[in-house]
């Protein structure tokens, strides 16, 4: 009636509304799950098309022989969407017996490392300089374990700009009252992404699920691990028998990040940064011989030339600094790093 005060909503009505909101939320999550599954199916279909139309052609031109360094194919078009659509192999006794893997008694990580250097020399940056010249001398890193041998290479651009001392003293971020807070962090990457990351000289923010980025919905950015959880970068990199020489390789970047310019996140031990607050500082390469591979390690069956990221293709500059998937298997690797020297 006119002039009568509105009665408070009954508890039954409140519960009904809450249930309705919950159903709407569940429905939205289900729609997102279906959409992601459809994108993965589309990516897998694209892989099959490449296998039929492109990849077979590429392999007829280059059939990798033992000890051969993979060249770069201009038809390469790998992206996170394709990489994540392929179920990775997990190293175990059964996988170790696959025909694509075979022990080589004389396998030498040092000799294989030379082939990795050639791999980099066969790829060029936008300035026409080969990627081997983008990084400094190779220094064995002694903080790894007995199964993996790590090698560290400084990014020459970072050193030429003054290294840590050359980083900005002020910060555009909302934390730190305008003063920067540069700290060391790590990012594991697929070996197929290595060329594109070095080509562009940076890690780009993950912010678009349609292209395969994986990120927390309200926290787009570059996903990394701090020093204490560096071993978890192994959730993202994958060992690959790059040169068919009995040695598997994986890659990880050491970066400097301005924590005064961070993206706040909850319920995760990962750091999230805007791309402007991330600097590539060094590259780590991890080598493991066939006989030293450990159960649970993620591995590629072979080097696939068309799955390599092509930095010269449109939209390939978005290079995938993504959060690790739940349930991934960490490798006991470079977890004990304490500083950047």
Image (cartoon, rainbow, N blue to C red):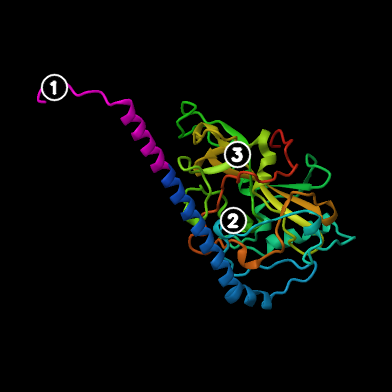
Splitting the image into 4 quarters, where does residue 16 fall? top left
Residue 248, compared with residue 65, is above or below; it is above
Q: Quadrant of the N terminus?
A: top left
Front position among marks 3 and 1: 1
Magenta residues, as a range? 1-25
Residue under numbered circle 2:
84
* Distance from the alpha carbon under mark 3 to that under mark 1: 64 Å
Q: Residues within 10 Å of mark 3 (few under 14, many from 20)?
A: many
Marks 1 and 2, the one that precedes in the sequence: 1
Q: Residue at x 57, y 51 (%)?
A: 201
Apparent side of residue 276 relative to residue 104 in the rendered image (left or right): left
* Distance from the alpha carbon under mark 3 to that under mark 2: 27 Å
Residue under numbered circle 1:
4
Do we see residue 133 in this rendering? yes
Q: Where is residue 320 drawn, in percent x and y?
A: 55, 51
Q: Which mark is residue 256?
A: 3
Q: Where is residue 328 drawn, in percent x and y?
A: 66, 46
Marks 3 and 1, the one that precedes in the sequence: 1
Helix, strand or loop under label 3:
strand
Q: Residue at x 67, y 50 (%)?
A: 237
């Amino acid at each position: 009636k006119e002039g009568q005060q509105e009665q408070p909503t009954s508890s039954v009505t409140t519960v009904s509304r809450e249930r309705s909101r919950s159903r709407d939320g569940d429905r939205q999550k289900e729609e997102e799950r279906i959409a992601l599954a459809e994108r993965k199916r589309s990516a897998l279909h694209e892989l099959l098309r490449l296998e039929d139309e492109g990849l077979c052609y590429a392999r007829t031109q280059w059939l990798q022989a033992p000890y051969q360094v993979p060249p770069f194919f201009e038809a390469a078009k790998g992206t996170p969407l394709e990489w994540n659509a392929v179920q990775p192999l997990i190293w175990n006794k059964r996988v170790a017996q696959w025909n694509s893997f075979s022990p080589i008694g004389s396998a030498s990580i040092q000799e294989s490392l030379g082939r990795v250097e050639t791999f980099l020399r066969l790829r060029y940056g936008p300035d026409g300089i080969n990627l081997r010249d983008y990084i400094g001398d190779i220094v064995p890193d002694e903080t790894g374990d007995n199964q993996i041998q790590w090698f560290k290479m400084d990014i020459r651009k970072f050193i030429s700009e003054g290294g840590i001392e050359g980083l900005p003293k002020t910060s555009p971020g909302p934390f730190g009252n305008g003063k920067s807070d540069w700290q060391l962090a790590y990012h594991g990457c697929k070996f197929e992404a290595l060329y594109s990351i070095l080509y562009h000289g940076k890690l780009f923010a993950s912010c678009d699920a349609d292209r395969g980025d994986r990120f927390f919905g309200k926290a787009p950015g570059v996903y990394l691990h701090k020093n204490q959880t560096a071993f978890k970068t192994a959730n993202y990199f994958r060992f690959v028998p790059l040169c068919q020489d009995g040695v598997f390789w994986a890659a990880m970047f050491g970066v400097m990040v301005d924590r005064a310019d961070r993206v706040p996140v909850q319920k995760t031990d990962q750091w999230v940064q805007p791309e402007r607050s991330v600097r590539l500082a060094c590259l780590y390469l991890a080598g493991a011989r066939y006989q030293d591979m450990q159960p649970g390690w993620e591995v590629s069956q072979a080097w696939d030339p068309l799955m390599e990221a092509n930095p010269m293709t449109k939209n390939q500059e978005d290079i995938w600094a993504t959060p690790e998937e739940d349930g991934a298997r960490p490798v006991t690797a470079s977890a004990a790093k304490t500083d950047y020297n």
